[in-house]
Amino acid sequence: MNIVSQENQKTAQQSTEQTAYVAPYVDVEATDSGYVLYAEMPGVNREGIEVTVDDGNLVIAGHRQAMAVGGDPLHRETRRLNFRRVYELDPSIDANRISARIEQGILTVTLPKAENQKPRRIALD
Amino acid sequence: MNIIRYQNQGRPDLAHAFDRFAALRDELDRLFDNSFGPVLRTPGSFSRWTPALDVYQDKDQFTVVAELPGLKKEDIELSLQDGVLTISGERKQEKKNEEGYRNERFFGRFQRSVTLPASVDGDKVKATYEEGVLRVVLPKAEEAKPKKIDVSVG
């Protein structure tokens, strides 16, 4: 798998020395113009999102807001961990034009291919 | 408190078996992708989507919190019957192509039920959905609230 390819374990390891993270569930969609990545980050708002490109790696991170809930827990399944995942970026992706947004806990990252990498139709003379 | 995070919905028919096989394959992909990394996974589900859910209590109310990223308000259904709160709904794909490059997320219907340990006032239940988290506040019925009784000592 080599497009928005293998997760880079080394980078992930370094980060977890400070904080415990959970890897979000992610869908990656291939489009004509590039890739779109959808990551599930419930409890994370705009301020909690951090998307960075560093040395060919795309890092998506989401920090949860402290949840104010009254009372004692009777039952708990949520883990309240912050989210983080690292992808190795394919060189065909134009890192300067990556964009991201978050809506109802879904982080959407658009990874456009560089113009000269897009499929093009060659007209016949 | 009797809440079981059940994994199965529907009959174990053939189509369902194939669904489960696909889910298992995805789960294995994910496992091997990350098996030597310290990045933790959310609790794995070998079958359908079972949203994580918390229940809290204070003296006046219960609060049920469910992680439901990527839904629309109108796609969430809440019902309260005989002291059982049921959260159900459907998650639809944002993607345009059915064929994903790589898919880990679950789409389709889900349902969770919570048996509340004391009676609640059904008319005063309030729910909000923000940042992909559903929060349902259920005020306790008057008779279920702890009462303070002053005892006069003669």
Image (spheres, rainbow, N blue to C red):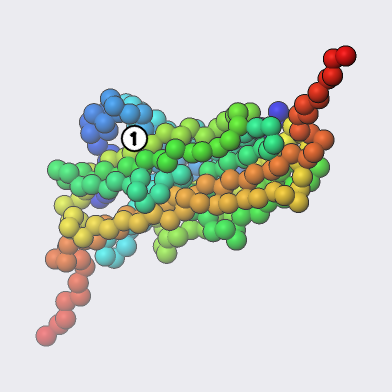
Nearest the camera: A105 or B140?
B140
Q: Quadrant of residue A94?
A: bottom left
Work out which residue is located at the far right of the displayed protein and give it: B154
Nearest the camera: B46 or A13?
A13
Q: Quadrant of residue B64?
A: top right
Q: Amino acid at mark 1?
A: Asp
Nearest the camera: B59 or A103?
B59
Work out which residue is located at the far top of the displayed protein and give it: B154
Work out which residue is located at the far front of the displayed protein and give it: B154
Picture coordinates of residue B102, whole percent (x, y): 37, 49
Q: Quadrant of residue A70?
A: top right
Instruction: Write the residue at 45% across / 60% down.
Output: B94
Instruction: Write the residue at 58% across / 51% down.
Output: B128
Kindly identify which residue carries mark 1. Answer: B33
Label 1's element?
Answer: helix
Q: Residues within 10 Å of mark 1 (few under 14, many from 20)?
A: some
